[in-house]
Amino acid sequence: MRLDYLYRFPVKGLTGEALDWTEVEPGGCIPWDRAFALAQGDSGFDPAAPEWLPKSNFMCLMKNARIASLRAGFEPRTGMLVIEAPDGTEIIANGFSQAGRERIGTFLAGFLGEDARGEPRFCYIPGHSFCDQRQKVISLISLTSLADYQARAGAERDRRRFRANVWFSGAPPWSELGWVGRQLQLGGARLRVLKRIARCPATEVNPDTAERDANPVAELRRLYGHSDLGIHAEVIEGGHFGIGDGIELLPD
């Protein structure tokens, strides 16, 4: 098996950034993945005592389809974030600074309009990831499973709908759903597969038009009897991996 595409998503819900390589630590996620998030004003999220909360407490595609039209970029060395709206307006600010986060939060709340609840706050807490899971994980999806799904659905379903960190090839379609509890060698890192990824309404959103124009959850259930596509894995041995690296399913 081979790693074909690698992504991080610095701002929860916004566009991903393609990577050539990354390096992970035990118990960690891909650096800067979901490092920032806009907490809705009614979320109760406390940056001084950060705890995991479900995605509905934050700006997210499941609730806020139009954010798919925003384009985001991040520079880790400086903390600078660039977020551009479809009308050409943009915010460029330092996500590491309180003043910068306040400016970004104001911009995003203005873009959300009526979808902003209370007084949203743009958050960054060093070492915290705003992952959809309670623990830091890496998401992996098989390209052959996606191809099989598209063929049976009779329609293209852009891989960006599913927001995986790692896309890989070389495995039989859907075989990865049986890897729960198994270990993977991913380049120089070792992972343990924790669970299958149950898809949610975020996948309805077209990444180009920001419209809800498909229902992958219903399609997967109709075609396969479940709504799963991809797997979540934890890092148990840190290391380097990148595009073209091999992936090996290790013996039990």
Image (cartoon, helix red, strand yellow):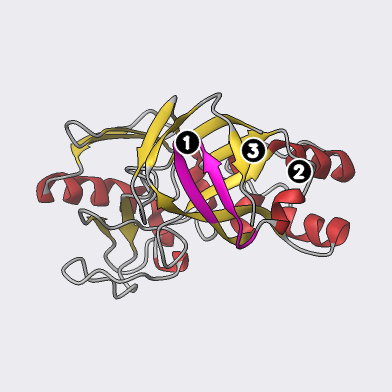
For the point 81% across and 62% down, the residue is 221
| Residue 49 placement (x, y as % from top left) | 20, 72
Which residue does the numbered mark 2 point to in the structure image? Answer: 145
| Residue 52 placement (x, y as % from top left) | 36, 69
| Quarter-of-image position of residue 37 | bottom left
Circle 1 packing at 10 Å, graded few (<14), some (14-19), many (20+), is many
Q: Is residue 232 visible?
A: yes
Element at badge 2?
A: helix
Query: Mark 2 is on which residue type?
Result: Ser
Circle 3 packing at 10 Å, graded few (<14), some (14-19), many (20+), is some
Q: Please state which of residues 224 and 42 is positioned toward the viewer in this rendering.
A: 224
Q: Main secondary structure of the magenta part?
A: strand
**Disc nearest the viewer among 1 and 3:** 1
Element at badge 1?
A: strand
Mark 1–mark 2 CB contact (< 8 Å) = no
Res 72 label: none
Relative horizontal placement of residue 38, taking residue 212 as reference (left or right): left
| Residue 198 placement (x, y as % from top left) | 65, 62
Query: Mark 1 is on which residue type?
Result: Tyr
Which residue does the numbered mark 1 point to in the structure image? Answer: 7
Which residue does the numbered mark 3 point to in the structure image? Answer: 159
Mark 2–mark 3 CB contact (< 8 Å) = no
Tell me which segment is drawn in magenta: 180-192
Separation (CA) of disc 1 from disc 3: 12 Å
* Magenta stretch encompasses residue 182: yes
Element at badge 3?
A: helix
Judge whether 35 appears above or below 247 on screen.
below
Pointer 1 or 2: first along the chain? 1
Pointer 2 or 3: first along the chain? 2
